Each structure stands twice: as structure tokens, then as C-alpha cells.
Image: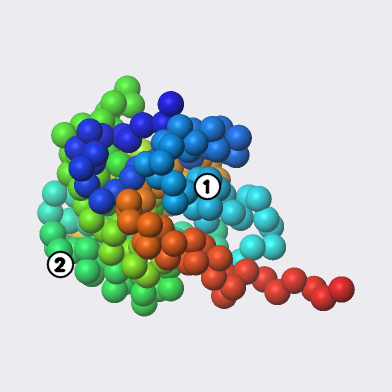
Amino acid sequence: MCSLQSQHFLNSPLLIFPKFNDNPKFHLNRTRNFGQRIGALSSVEEFLPNATRRKKDSLWRGGFSLGVDLGLSRTGLALSKGFCVRPLTVLKLRGEKLELRLLEIAQREETDEFIIGLPKSWDGSETPQSNKVRSVAGRLAVRAAERGWRVYLLDEHRTSAEALDRMINMGLSKSARQTKTDAYAAVILLERYFSMSGQGTEIVLPKSVDLQEKLRKGALDNDFFPDKPEG
């Protein structure tokens, strides 16, 4: 049975689908169990993450992905254009200012999806910080859907530790590591996302039928698909 990830969202304008599994039948069955509640959705296949699209179609050439490592006071960003992932910046913003800034950066970098790290414990259970991240992801998802962009959640366990190890191996100074850890954690998150071809992600969907339709149109934007040969 398909269920929302958190009781907190039952009365919110959002739907959060289960983790993506590379099995279309699995998703179709779970989607049907929602019945009339999400009648606007025919299949989670309509909202596949970019990494999964690339795996399914080697000729597919778009779009770009923004990795987001949300912290209590700082948010690290990483950018992927194709399979090349690089640290982008660290934001010291919160609330609406952070959400609007994320949208501005996504517009500038021509990204069409956000991959947001979801904090989890070593045993896979969620933490108090998980609820805060889900709240931010939910608000961002509504704003992003207005532009046809998707928001996904992905387990970020140990991304900060791996980021620190990488920066040490790169020879970055202690002061540099302190200012760049969040951005490199977002890099690790995006690399994990692509290495798993998008499996393990959760899409955050607005309940609004109109916003869901905008997401469909965004996913089918011809600018992100190669021209098919004639004949």
C-alpha cells in the first residue's frame, strides 16, 4: 500500500511518493492504491529523476541537477550538468529567503530538479532534522512546480564525513574545509544519486492538479530531448 512518508503532510498541499525503485510495475500498483486521492497521477514514471532518464535513454541530453545539503545555518549546493558534478556555493540563508535564492540559482544554472539530502541515522531511521528538511523541501516543491521543476529527497547519511575525507585528500587547508564542507557534501550527494541511477529518491509532489500538470509539461519540454531522425 502506498502511504505518505509523514503524517505531518496529510493536511498539507503535498504528496510524497515512496522511494523510486527501477520497476515500473511496482510504481503503477502503488499509485493505484491512492484511488481518487491522487487521480491526477497515472504513474510515477511521469516524474522520473534525470539520472533514471539517462539510464533508460542514452540519447536523452537534459536536464541539469542541483544538489542541496540543508543545514541548520548553512546550505551547500552542488551542480551537475551531465555526469560532471562540482561544488557550487554555500548559502547562509534560512526560510523564504533561502527558498527564493535556490530558485534563482536553479534558473541561472538551467536546472530542472533539486536533489535534497535527507538526514538519517546509521540504521536508516529518520531524525528530528529529517522533519525540518521535509518541511523546507515541501515548500520548495510548491514554488518549483510553478516553473515545472521537480524536488526529490535522497538519504544523505555520511555525506559530510565523506566530503571531509575528500577535501583532506585534495590537500585543502583547515580553513578552506570549514567553509566548503557543505558544498562538497552536496557533491557527494549528487554523485551518489547518479551512481544509483536515481534509485532511492522520493519525489515531493504538490497536491494541486494544476501544479502536477506543470510538472508533466516540464518533464516533456522538447528543449531537453534530442531531435529524432526523420524517416
Secondary structure category for the residue under label 1: loop
- Return the x and y of residue 139 as percentages of the image width and height: 23, 56
The kind of residue on which mark 2 rests is: Lys
Rendering coords of residue 64 (x, y %): 48, 65
Residue placed at 80% from the left, 73% from the top? 229
Residue positioned 23% across, 41% down in the render: 9
Q: Is residue 70 visible?
A: no
Q: Which residue is tagged 1?
A: 42
Residue marked by disc 2 = 97
Quick check: 136 left or right of 95? right
> Residue 173: horizontal and vertical position, in percent?
26, 56
Hey, what amino acid is under mark 1? Ser
Q: Residue furthest top?
A: 123
The quarter of the picture where residue 222 lies is bottom right
Q: How many numbered tags mark residues here?
A: 2
The residue depicted at 44 percent of the width and 46 percent of the height is: 39
Query: Contact, CB < 8 Å: mark 2 with mark 1?
Result: no
The front one of 175 and 218 is 218
Looking at the rendered image, the disc whose residue lies closer to the viewer, 2 or 1, is 1
Local secondary structure at mark 2: helix
Left or right for 53, reference 6:
right
x 63%, y 50%: residue: 55
Q: Distance between the residues labelled 2 and 1?
A: 34 Å
**Circle 2 crowding by C-alpha within 10 Å: few under 14, some 14–19, many from 20:** few
The C terminus, quarter of image: bottom right
